[in-house]
Image (cartoon, grey):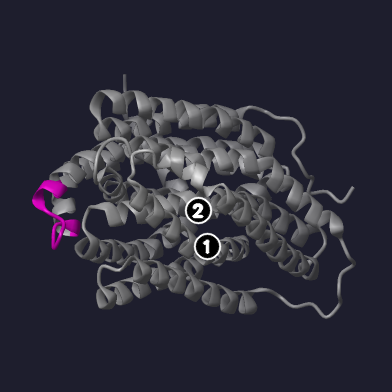
């Protein structure tokens, strides 16, 4: 069998993919994001050298997960729906209506976040009794204090997510990708000066996020067109946004349970396990951001606009081809990263209170985490395609089924192999999730939640 035509065909597909506008935008976004993530890694090295692996970082990381579970679930659901609705409003009603919708969405999200945090703090002792079942009472009290300190950070994060949604809708990819560099720069500077003080760490995180908010608002003031003629009141826009968010919220809430489930299992695996898993996840999470989030950020507006024009066939073909390329690339990158994992951990973290024994433990965990890359990358692309179709209910049901299955895999493997089994269970769950989500994306659904047509 002559393989030359097959190789030529594959090369032609790769060349067309590389020339695609979405690919060029994603490459630019990933390039800028790599600089931001390099700075973020330097920040993690500074934090690791100051705090090491121990009870203080365990309490901080658990607090991040606990307060982030409800707030980020709501904010992420809102951003997904917002981008699609914002583009629809621009196409149908114009720029002034879109600007009005943005203001209403921000106010609504802040009110919802405030109510959610009040309820969450009321039930925090019961949450800690489950999530922190392996922690001493003094450490639980420290987690509670850290959760309270992190509330402003998560409210600012919610505002930022909608701001980034506007910038992504307007194709302001490169400048918006650079904005997050403010947070690690501020954290590094203040932690280096303040030492091993969790108050300084949390305060610097909040201050850096506020700096992001200011930069987003400045960029929005330049990119958001102004109209002299006010648009008519359209309460239906806000209703569509609120209704779509509510439909998607159960799914994002269950998805946000993933780190909670992981830390619940980890808290019973011994002292320092939570922080060791946290350090081990840094490299896989960064690679996911560079290789998946960049594509997801650029693809949701592209998919939404293509489907709005009725070009479902070409959109579907591009989705299938790109998912295949992303999966192969993810497997190759994971294999290379696993081989270099030990050297990376030593260079990035082994200093100060972070001992060589800590480095060996984190290396093993990191290698298990890295195999999630192919599934996580393909799953992100598929989720963007489903979101562009407006199939929020399907996304919610999917998450409510797959997250518990992943948690079961983590628990079963952790029972056999300890922390390494927990990390590998995360990778196995990501692979299974991607397979099911890819099928869901290609399944022809009924009419989406909201139509792009005025009728």
Q: Regarding mark 1 in the picture, which secondary structure is present there?
A: helix
Q: Quadrant of residue 254?
A: top right
> Does residue 333 lie above or below 39 as drawn?
above
The answer to whether residue 20 is seen in the rendering is no
183 relative to 253 in the view: left or right: left
| Label located before the other in sequence (2 or 1) | 2
| Picture coordinates of residue 182, whole percent (x, y) | 41, 73
The residue that disc 2 covers is 67
Magenta residue span: 348-359
- Given residues 133 and 292, the one toward you in this image is 133
Spatial CA distance of label 2 from label 1 is 7 Å
Could you tell me if the residues under marks 2 and 1 are in contact, i.e. CB atoms within 8 Å?
Answer: yes
**Which residue sits at x=52%, y=48%?**
124
The residue that disc 1 covers is 151
Say if the magenta span includes residue 442. no
| Picture coordinates of residue 371, whole percent (x, y) | 31, 36
Say if the magenta span includes residue 357. yes
Which labelled disc corresponds to residue 273?
A: none
């Amino acid at each position: 069998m002559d393989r030359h035509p097959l190789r030529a065909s594959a090369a032609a597909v790769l060349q067309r993919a590389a020339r695609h506008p979405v690919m060029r935008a994603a490459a630019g976004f990933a390039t800028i994001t790599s600089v931001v993530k390099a700075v973020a890694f330097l920040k993690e090295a500074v934090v690791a050298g100051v705090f090491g692996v121990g009870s203080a970082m365990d309490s901080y990381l658990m607090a991040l997960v606990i307060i982030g579970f409800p707030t980020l679930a709501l904010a992420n659901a809102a951003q997904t729906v917002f981008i699609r609705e914002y583009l629809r409003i621009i196409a149908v009603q114009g720029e002034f209506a879109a600007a009005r919708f943005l203001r209403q969405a921000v106010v609504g999200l802040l009110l919802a976040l405030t109510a959610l945090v009040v309820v969450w703090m009321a039930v925090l002792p019961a949450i800690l009794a489950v999530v922190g079942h392996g922690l001493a009472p003094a450490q639980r009290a420290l987690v509670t204090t850290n959760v309270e300190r992190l509330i402003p950070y998560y409210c600012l994060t919610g505002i930022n997510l909608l701001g980034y949604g506007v910038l992504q809708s307007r194709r302001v990819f490169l400048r918006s990708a650079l904005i997050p560099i403010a947070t690690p720069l501020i954290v590094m500077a203040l932690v280096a000066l303040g030492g091993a003080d969790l108050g300084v760490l949390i305060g610097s995180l909040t201050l850096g996020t506020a700096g992001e908010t200011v930069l987003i608002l400045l960029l929005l003031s330049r990119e958001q067109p102004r109209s002299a003629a006010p648009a008519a009141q359209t309460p239906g826009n806000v209703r569509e946004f609120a209704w779509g968010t509510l439909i998607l919220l159960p799914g994002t809430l269950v998805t946000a349970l993933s780190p909670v489930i992981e830390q619940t299992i980890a808290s019973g695996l011994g002292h320092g396990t939570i922080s060791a898993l946290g350090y081990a996840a840094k490299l896989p999470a960064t690679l996911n951001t560079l290789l998946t989030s960049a594509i997801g950020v650029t693809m949701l507006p592209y998919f939404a606009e293509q489907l709005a024009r009725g070009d479902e066939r070409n959109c579907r073909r591009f989705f299938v081809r790109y998912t295949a390329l992303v999966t192969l690339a993810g497997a190759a990158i994971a294999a290379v990263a696993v081989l270099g994992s030990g050297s990376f951990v030593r260079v990035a973290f082994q200093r100060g209170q972070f001992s060589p024994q800590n480095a060996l433990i984190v290396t093993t965990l990191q290698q298990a985490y890295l195999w999630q890359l192919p599934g996580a990358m393909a799953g992100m692309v598929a989720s963007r395609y489903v979101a562009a179709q407006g199939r929020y209910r399907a996304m919610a049901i999917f998450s409510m089924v797959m997250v518990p299955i992943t948690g079961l895999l983590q628990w079963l493997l952790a029972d056999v192999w300890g922390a390494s089994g927990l990390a590998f269970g995360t990778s196995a769950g990501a692979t299974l999730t991607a397979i099911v989500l890819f099928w869901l994306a290609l399944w022809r659904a009924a009419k989406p939640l909201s139509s792009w047509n005025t009728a």
